[in-house]
Image (tube, rainbow, N blue to C red):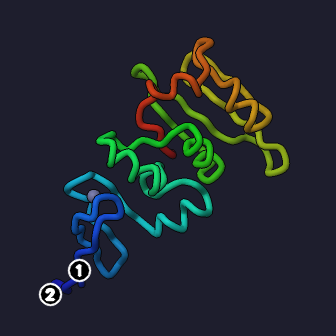
Amino acid sequence: MKKDIKEEPVPCEICGYPVIHNEYGFYQNCPKCGWRRGCDNTVLEQQWGIGYPMLVSLSHAREQYKQGLPFKADFDEFIQGLFFYSEMLFDYQGATCEVFLKGDEKSDIIVFCCTEFQQEYFSEKDFREKANIHGKCLKDIWDEVQDPRYM
Ligand SMILES: [Zn+2]
């Protein structure tokens, strides 16, 4: 016999459209704006500056929705995500690039690599300012980066 799972509609965090939430904590993807919710994103944003399962933070996602933009994490959220998840990915001009933390907690090295190169940075500041793809700073070409995400 199939057990009935208790479900109730709750307003989408972003657009307010009713989405199904069940007793196991599952949220349906929002049919109106496409937002996916998996936990208390307000708390996650306060503590880490990111969202889950979508990397973009709640308040930033609301802004993007208002402006009619697709949800996408900015460079800051990507870096915050790196320190939360340790391994991140994004696509650039059809190639997938990876950023991950190497080393122990005292001396994190940030490794940035794709098939054509590997770069290592010894501080967040260094990575933020110097990480580049063929000489173009990552922070400057972030608009062209697609689907920044955790691994
Ligand atoms: Zn929505």
Q: Residue 1 carries which label?
A: 2
The quadrant of the rendering that contains the N terminus is: bottom left
Q: Foreground residue, 100 or 8?
A: 8
Amino acid on which disc 1 is placed = Glu
x, y (%) of residue 15?
29, 59
Label ID, residue 129: none
Residue drawn at x 68%, y 32% as measured from the top left: 128
Q: Who's the residue at 65% across and 22% down the image?
A: 118
Q: Nearer the viewer, residue 142 or 59?
A: 59
Q: Is mark 1 on a helix, strand or loop?
A: strand
* Residue located beneath label 1 in the image: 7
Distance (Cα) linking label 2 and label 1: 18 Å
Crowdedness of circle 2 by 10 Å Cα count: few (<14), some, many (20+)?
few
User: Foreground: 88 or 76?
Assistant: 76
| Proximity of marks 2 and 1: CB atoms separated by less than 8 Å | no
The amino acid pointed to by label 2 is: Met
Earlier in the chain: of badge 2 and badge 1, it is: 2
The structure residue drawn at horizontal position 33% and vertical position 48%, both measured from the top left corner, is 65
